[in-house]
Image: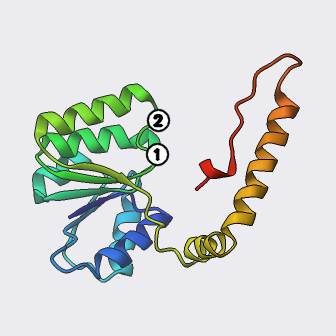
Amino acid sequence: ALLAGCGGMSREWLKFLQQVEGVEVVGLVDVIEENTRARAQEFGLEGVYTGSDISKALNTISPDIVFDVTVPEAHVDITLAALEQGCHVLGEKPMADSMENARKMISAAEKAGKIYSVIQNRRYDTRIRRLRRFIETHYAAVKQDLATAFVERCREFCAPGGTAVLVTPQNWL
């Protein structure tokens, strides 16, 4: 696997990837090359490819998959390069910085016959799970409060004679 993007979120991805059986991180790429070396050292990734050029990395190490943890503006370049080299790609949301780029990425995945998936890697974050349990425990009350707040905000922004869509508690969550 090649991890593209060695900023703060890369730590969480690398912690996770080190626990996944059958996944070996063989390279790190970032626009700031020093970040790749620092992250490799931090995670004990001796001998992995480190650099700032995605194309060079893909040609040098030929990974099966690229994990894209870059900023949204870089997603299209990383994804297209990886798909063109025959790699699957797993990226974070948002998918792209524009609908045009999102369409390019989908088209490239279809053309390459590779999997391109976008996820949010916080599903198992304890804070998110705690919030989910709270909502499930207090489901009816929370849904009613959210629906009421939404309708009240709509009334504030709708001009006299304007139209608002009523969202009922049954439509929430």
Which disc is residue 49 wearing? none
Q: Which quadrant of the figure has residue 99?
A: top left
Distance of mark 1 from mark 2, alpha carbons?
Answer: 7 Å
Residue under the point 43% across and 72% down:
11
Are the residues at dot 1 and dot 2 in contact (C-beta closer than 8 Å)? yes
Badge 1: few (under 14), some or many (20 or more) residues near its Cα, within 10 Å? some
Q: Nearer the viewer, mark 1 or mark 2?
A: 1
Q: Give the structural element (helix, strand or loop) at label 2.
A: loop
In this picture, residue 56 sits left or right of residue 94 = left
Q: Is residue 78 left or right of residue 111?
A: right
- Occupied quadrant, residue 105: top left
Q: Give the residue type at disc 1.
A: Pro
Task: Locate residue 146 relative to residue 160 in the image: left or right.
Answer: left
In the foreground, 7 or 94: 94
Q: Position of residue 47 (x, y in %)?
A: 19, 75
Which mark, by number, is residue 97?
A: 2
* Amino acid beneath label 2: Asp
Which residue matches tag 1? Answer: 94
Q: Quadrant of the N terminus?
A: bottom left
Image quadrant containing the C terminus: bottom right
The percent coordinates of residue 64 (x first, y second) are 13, 59
Q: Residue at x 12, y 60 (%)?
A: 61
Q: Is residue 39 above or below residue 147?
A: below
Quarter of the image where one finds residue 32: bottom left
Residue lying at 45% horizontally and 50% vertically, measured from the top left: 93
